[in-house]
Amino acid sequence: MRLGVNIDHVATIREARKTDEPDPVAAAVLVELAGADGIVCHLREDRRHLQDRDLYLLKEMVRSHLNLEMAATMEMTDIATKVKPDMATIVPEKREEITTEGGLNVVNNFDLIKDTTMKLRESGIIVSLFVDPDLEQIKASAKAGADYIELHTGKYAEAEDAKTQEEELEKIQSMAFAGVKLGLGVSAGHGLTYLNVQGIARLDKIEELNIGHSIISRSVFTGIERAVLDMIDLINN
Ligand code: PXP
């Protein structure tokens, strides 16, 4: 299973002072050197962490795989088709949220998401849709022309007891099978930590995990290379 590391929170620290350190682009280089399979970043409409400058530099610097999380807006589609990351992951975005809450509603916003998916694919970008482990959303994702789905693991991560966690795990597993059956690649992420990642890492058919907050948090104490290596070890063992 591959690991994509979301480096947004390095930019969050920088933006707390509106200064030039720490630099998320430097973080991306170290994350790659530590052995991660890709870099994930989210250019939000309100630019609360990553800035346009970061994205352009990441495109130049990242040698592995660059996955841009973006809202399905004209502004972001224009930027993505100019920058051409390897992959774009369409996510829902609300100004007042602290982080991405819940998956994309592909069923209710089908035309917009299909249109955005088509524009991105036409410019050579692989498209992933960030959805809850829900069969209707996964079917709609395939119909919209997506290459991948990223299954939202938030409910699994936040489960307060073992039974709920096991139920969420089973749901994610069966939805990963459903995605593959519909011809989609499957990744997963959100809320994964050093304590809960192994449940997901044991599942079949999930190609990649995208993890941000937990790795950047640990890196404050251990350094970013150690933090990435520790996560890779947990995923692979
Ligand atoms: N995947 C997607 C689509 C996300 O929006 C996020 C959060 O930016 C993540 C993965 C990573 O989540 P976390 O920071 O909780 O690891």
Image: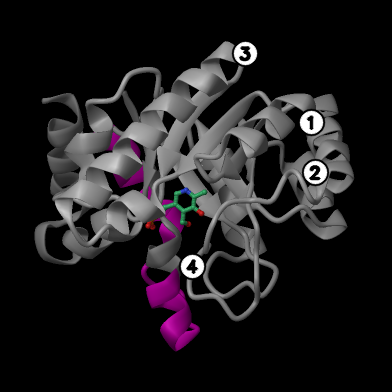
Disc 2 residue type?
Answer: Ile
Question: What residue does disc 3 label?
Answer: 183
Residue 38 versus residue 228 in the image, above or below: above
Question: What residue does disc 2 label?
Answer: 113
Disc 4 residue type?
Answer: Thr
Query: Which badge, 4 or 3, is on the more N-terminal residue?
Result: 4
Residue occupying image coordinates x 36% and y 68%: 22
Residue 99's label in the rendered image is 4
Q: Position of residue 107 (x, y in %)?
A: 75, 44
Could you say which is closer to the camera, residue 180 or residue 220?
A: 180
Instruction: Give the magenta-colored segment's residue range.
Output: 12-35
Local SS, label 4: loop
Look at the numbered discs 2 and 1 and tell me whether their residues touch, using CB distance below 8 Å: yes
Residue 10 versus residue 225 in the image, above or below: below
| Disc 1: CA contacts within 10 A as few (<14), some (14-19) or many (>=20) | many
Q: Is residue 100 visible in this depiction of the protein? A: yes
Judge whether residue 19 is colored magenta. Answer: yes
Question: What residue does disc 1 label?
Answer: 144
Could you say which is closer to the camera, residue 53 or residue 226?
A: 226
- Magenta segment, prevailing SS (helix, strand or loop): helix
Q: Quadrant of residue 45?
A: bottom right
Q: Position of residue 40 (x, y in %)?
A: 48, 45
Is the residue indicated by label 4 positioned so its CB lies within 8 Å of ligand 1? yes
Query: Which badge, 2 or 4, is on the more N-terminal residue?
Result: 4
Alpha carbon distance from label 1 to label 3 = 12 Å
Residue occupying image coordinates x 17% and y 60%: 218
Local SS, label 1: loop
Local SS, label 2: helix
Disc 1 residue type?
Answer: Ala
Query: Which badge, 2 or 1, is on the more N-terminal residue?
Result: 2
Judge whether residue 179 is colored magenta. Answer: no
Q: Nearer the viewer, mark 1 or mark 4?
A: 1
